[in-house]
Image (cartoon, grey):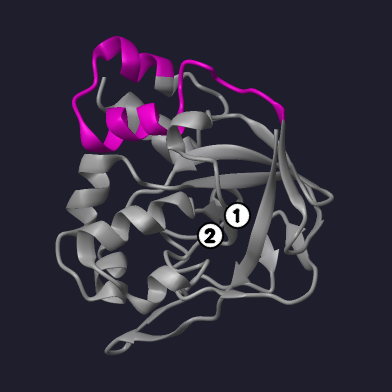
Amino acid sequence: MKHIVTAVCTGTARPFNGAELSAITKRPRESAVQVLTEGLAPDEQADRRVHGGPEMALHLYPLDHHAWWRGEIGDHPALDEPGGFGSNLAVSGLTEEMVHIGDRFRLGTALIEVSQPRQPCWKIEHRFGHKGMVARIIASGRSGWYFRVIETGEVAAGDSLERVATGAEDWSVARVFRTLVAGKATRDELAELAALATLAPKLREKASARL
């Protein structure tokens, strides 16, 4: 099934919280954008220790969640923006339960692969000015996820995001998030994740350390 990319969004690191910088505010691009191993060009991440890099090259936060958030926090200008949660790709009809670690998608002319859920941080709450959003993400599983880039290319708004290969069918993004971030994991689950080659190395290490 093909999903239309409503917008391709990039950002620059700007003052966010005093002296701290963030590029969580992503704006739609009007023309085609290069999809490179490190992500979209141009796109920035302020803190490269926890954002960006090959395992977090592209972020997708489902557009479907924006309506749910209106019910939780009321109207907010960022909810009208396709990249309001720091998402690079604005896509409807695709959520965490529907995609698996290792799923491959054709994005424009690029080939990308699901690598890990997004782990929420305080910057989301600061961006929206609402406390408790991280807890709501953990409770609801509305985490979004990251892709790594298998084949570079380019993408523009109006292009398609089409799944071309299914990865670990037992490990949806939602289940990985519940297991490693939101809940208690069994030893068998942790062992499976530690051995899941398409899961981002940092999360494999996290699973292994909890065994």
| Residue 89, numbered label | none
- Residue 57 in the figure: left or right of residue 201: right
Number of other residues with Cα within 10 Å of mark 2, as a class: few under 14, some 14 to 19, many 20 or more: many
Quadrant of the rendering where the C terminus is positioned = top left
Please say if 190 is above or below 8.
above
Residue 46 visible in the current orientation:
yes
Does 28 appear in magenta?
A: no
Report the residue at 24% width, 44% height from top: 138
Residue type (three-letter) at the residue carrying disc 1: Ala
Residue where numbered disc 1 is placed: 57
Disc 2 element:
loop
Does 180 appear in magenta?
A: yes
- Residue 48 in the figure: left or right of residue 109: left
Mark 2–mark 1 Cα distance, whole angstroms, equals 6 Å
Please say if 119 is above or below 177.
below
Report the residue at 49% width, 81% height from top: 13
User: In the picture, residue 207 is in which quadrant?
Assistant: top left
Residue where numbered disc 2 is placed: 52
Report the residue at 41% width, 15% height from top: 192
Residue 205, horizontal then vertical, whole percent: 39, 32
Contact check, label 2 and label 1, Cβ < 8 Å: yes
State which region is magenta: 164-192
Residue type (three-letter) at the residue carrying disc 2: Gly
